[in-house]
């Protein structure tokens, strides 16, 4: 169970501009800790966006992404009142879903 | 002759008891505009739209109202200077004098004080890891970020009504100008006059209204390492850069220095937690 995301969804016409801020350590597996031991890989593997329960966006991501990443995408055909939910899963099987209701433009 | 001497003495006296720069209080600082600065500002504006500091702010809001510590109480009764539980606008009105401790305290120091007195946390244990690293962010940092965010868009207004608060300003002033260490450095060596820079980094003159730039953006999310830092960390690092001995976390000296900077920045608008390189 990760920490809460910050989801911002702004409606411009029928295009929804989505920005998601996620709290995640995103360890690459290359970094060493103070004692010289490798810090194990820990990164978000998939990101899924659902609009009213229907998957509209899916991404496979790697450890090349920064800590506490921001994801942005645009979505056509959304309207005010729609429910947008974002889910990420990481390589340790951890998972987090947050939902927002799209506000009027 | 005697009159001239008396005038000299008066001038020396005035210099000995530092008073906040009066003219600087509402005038926005004049910043040298050049192509580099403008490019940096564009870069910052893009990053500020999605600042991970918001994640820490949200986490701090949770921590604030969650019953924790050996006494299992929340911080909702913590007095940040505007009365128990009042968080809105408290950050820009600190450092200030607190009658219950008889000391002038800055935001992070007061928050830690509340964690110790209300929640029963051990002050020494909290001081063991005061700053964020790659794997963990200490609670006082997260809480300070939350508290600071509740003063977004407000004017910096630390009180200077009590003699203790004026003494803290005077001490902060003295520390700011105190030259010592391996490099014979003082804060004022870099931050004592206008228009200085190190490589592309412009150095604000913190002796006047530009002191707002020491407050702006802190607590800040540092992209280098992806960690959240407060002003306590920033000042600690200033002393490291000057090759001074490490100042004690939450000490009177750091509160005094923060008082000096906050009072110099009086009247300027604080924009809330920020993002740093």
Image (cartoon, coloured by chain):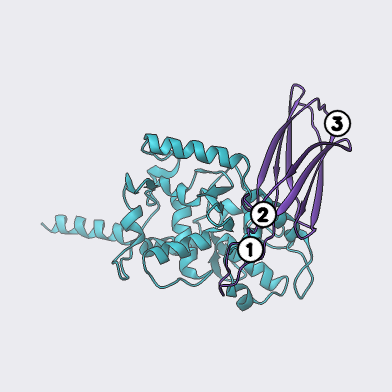
Q: How many marks?
A: 3
Question: Residue at left 33%, top 57%?
Answer: B188
Q: Which residue position is annotated with label 3?
A: A81
Q: Are marks 3 and 1 in contact (CB under 8 Å)?
A: no
Q: Are marks 2 and 3 in contact (CB under 8 Å)?
A: no
- Marks 3 and 1 belong to one chain: no
Q: Which chain is purple?
A: A
What element does badge 3 sit on?
Answer: loop
Question: Residue at left 70%, top 47%?
Answer: A61
Q: Are marks 1 and 2 in contact (CB under 8 Å)?
A: yes
Question: Marks 1/2: CA distance?
Answer: 9 Å
Q: How many C-alpha atoms fall within 10 Å of the one at disc 2: few (<14), some, or many (≥20)? A: many
Question: Which colour is chain B painted?
Answer: cyan
Q: Which residue position is annotated with label 2?
A: B56
Q: How many C-alpha atoms fall within 10 Å of the one at disc 3: few (<14), some, or many (≥20)? A: few
- The quadrant in which residue B72 appears is bottom right
The subunit letter for the residue under badge 3 reads A
Relative to B192, residue B241 above or below: below
């Amino acid at each position: 169970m990760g920490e809460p995301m910050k989801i911002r969804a702004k409606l411009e016409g029928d295009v929804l501009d989505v920005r998601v801020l996620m709290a995640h350590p995103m360890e690459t597996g290359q970094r060493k800790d103070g004692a010289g031991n490798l810090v194990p890989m820990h990164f978000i593997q998939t990101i899924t966006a659902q609009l009213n329960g229907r998957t509209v966006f899916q991404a496979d991501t790697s450890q090349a992404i920064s800590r506490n990443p921001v994801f942005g995408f645009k979505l056509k055909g959304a309207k005010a009142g729609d429910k947008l939910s974002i889910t990420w899963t990481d390589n340790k099987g951890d998972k987090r879903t947050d939902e927002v209701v799209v506000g009027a433009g | 002759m005697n009159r001239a001497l008396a005038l000299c003495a008066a001038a020396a006296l005035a210099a000995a008891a530092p008073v906040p720069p009066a003219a600087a209080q509402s005038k926005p600082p004049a910043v040298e505009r050049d192509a580099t600065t403008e490019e940096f500002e564009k870069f910052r504006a893009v990053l500020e739209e999605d600042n991970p500091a918001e994640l820490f702010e949200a986490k701090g809001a949770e921590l604030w109202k969650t019953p924790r510590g050996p006494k299992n109480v929340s911080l909702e009764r913590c007095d940040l200077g505007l009365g128990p539980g009042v968080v809105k606008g408290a950050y820009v009105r600190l450092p200030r004098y607190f009658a219950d401790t008889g000391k002038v305290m800055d935001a992070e120091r007061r928050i830690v004080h509340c964690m110790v007195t209300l929640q029963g946390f051990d002050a020494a244990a909290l001081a063991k890891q005061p700053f964020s690293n790659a794997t963990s962010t200490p609670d006082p940092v997260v809480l300070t970020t939350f508290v600071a965010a509740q003063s977004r868009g407000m004017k910096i207004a630390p009180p200077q009504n009590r003699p203790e608060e004026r003494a803290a300003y005077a001490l902060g002033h003295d520390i700011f100008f105190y030259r010592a260490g391996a490099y014979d450095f003082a804060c004022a060596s870099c931050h004592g006059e206008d228009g200085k820079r190190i490589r592309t980094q412009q150095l604000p003159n913190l002796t006047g209204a530009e002191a707002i730039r020491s407050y702006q953006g802190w607590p800040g999310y540092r992209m280098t390492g992806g960690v959240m830092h407060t002003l306590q960390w920033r000042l600690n690092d200033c002393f490291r850069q000057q090759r001074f001995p490490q100042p004690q976390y939450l000490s009177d000296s750091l509160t005094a220095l923060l008082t000096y900077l906050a009072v110099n920045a009086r009247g300027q608008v604080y924009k809330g937690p920020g993002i740093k390189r």
